[in-house]
Amino acid sequence: MRTQFEIVVVGGGLAGACAAALLARHGHIPAERIAMLSDELPPVPAPDDPAELRVVAISRASERVLRAAAAWLNLDASRLCAYERVRVWHETSPPRGAGSLCFDAAEIGEPNLGFIAENGALMRACQQSFLAAGGSRVDSKLAALDLQQNEARLRCADGRELTAKLVVGADGAQSLVRTASGLTVRTWDYRQAAIVATVRTAKPHEGTAWQRFLRTGPLALLPLFNGQSSIVWSVDSAPAQELLDLSDAQFNDRLTAASDEVLGSAMLTSRRVSFPLRSVAARSYVTARCALIGDAAHVIHPLAGQGANLGLLDAAALCEAVAGAIAQHEDPGALRALRRYEQQRRTQNQLMDAAMGAFHTGFAASVGPGAWLVNQALGAVNRSGALKRAFARHALGTAGELPRLARVSASGQT
């Protein structure tokens, strides 16, 4: 016997859980007709627990999406860290020199540029909102998917069977939904790994996101609520393994040097983890009865910290496409309705992917004319008020075409 739903979201990560919550609250479909298939349920941390190892930078646009999903108020505000500035510099220039770039929220009349938030807390907040709205959580994994003309049939790992008018693939970069639906991807290997850890620094982080571009890849230090910093160190594969094999003391020394001692000496307070860096782009996000969002549709280089934000914008755009189809008495799983979502998001995501690739290549120059050009470009932007404001708006996520749910705050203000 199959359990019938209108929509099944496969994956309870940030993009999937947010999509489920948005659909339950804004999709014009009864929440009980929506299911989220996921065995991911992050534990609730104790008040004095250290920061989660995986954190994300949430832009203003993403904050609005999370507010629309009724998830933002589920977050523990004491574990969020607002960041007011972003400072970027090349290894051939000092962090506060003429060749560095700093943009500040105050320059565009904003209280901050966004928040550094724990990924697990965001997932939990969205799942809580979905369940509070009346949605159904199926605690299992997807085993098989069969897209038919009038419905999608899903078989769970525990043997349960579900049907839906629409399946949302939010099951990550190795998406089974994507494979089963016949949607293909283009993949580019950066031949790098990102090392993630939490560190304590001798100097305060100043509510600033710091990023130094090195020949071997960028190093970011993101401010955390407890005064510590999260590092994302993207390094060519061979030196990355060398860094992982170092003792904690040796790693601390290498990290302090790589950061140009911008926050003084750095000391690990967590384990180190790494993951390979690739660009993954689905050639199409949709087919009849199926739509991909988040990492199932696209994975980009983490140097600007935009991956999670793109997934949240996908969730908002898909919700609006589904709600529009329902309002017009259309089948939400019909290809015509899903194309509206794809048309809005695929181009924007491709542009961001291309920009990250260009930044990665351009900033790799460590000496000579290439490095000189990088420093000149950063300095020119830093001296231009108009360009700095434009960069700040991109950091806020408020530039370009946005879904309505990312443009409107909880108070209805754009």
Image (cartoon, rainbow, N blue to C red):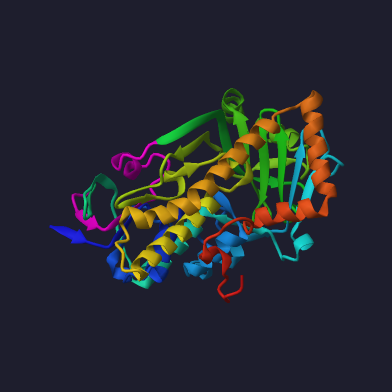
Instruction: Answer above or below: position of 105 versus 246.
Output: below
Residue 375 appears left or right of 289: right
Instruction: Answer above or below: position of 325 versus 54.
Output: below
Q: Position of residue 177 (x, y in %)?
A: 32, 45
Residue 160 painted magenta: yes
- Toward the viewer: 297 or 66? 297
Say which residue appears at 80% left-offset and 23% top-offset: 368
Range covered by the magenta-colored residues: 158-184
- Toward the viewer: 46 or 389? 389
Q: Is residue 73 visible?
A: yes
Which corner quadrant holds the C terminus? bottom right
Instruction: Answer above or below: position of 220 versus 338.
Output: above
Q: Is residue 53 visible?
A: no
Q: Quadrant of residue 238?
A: top right
Q: Which residue extends farthest bottom?
A: 411
Q: Which residue extends farthest left?
A: 1
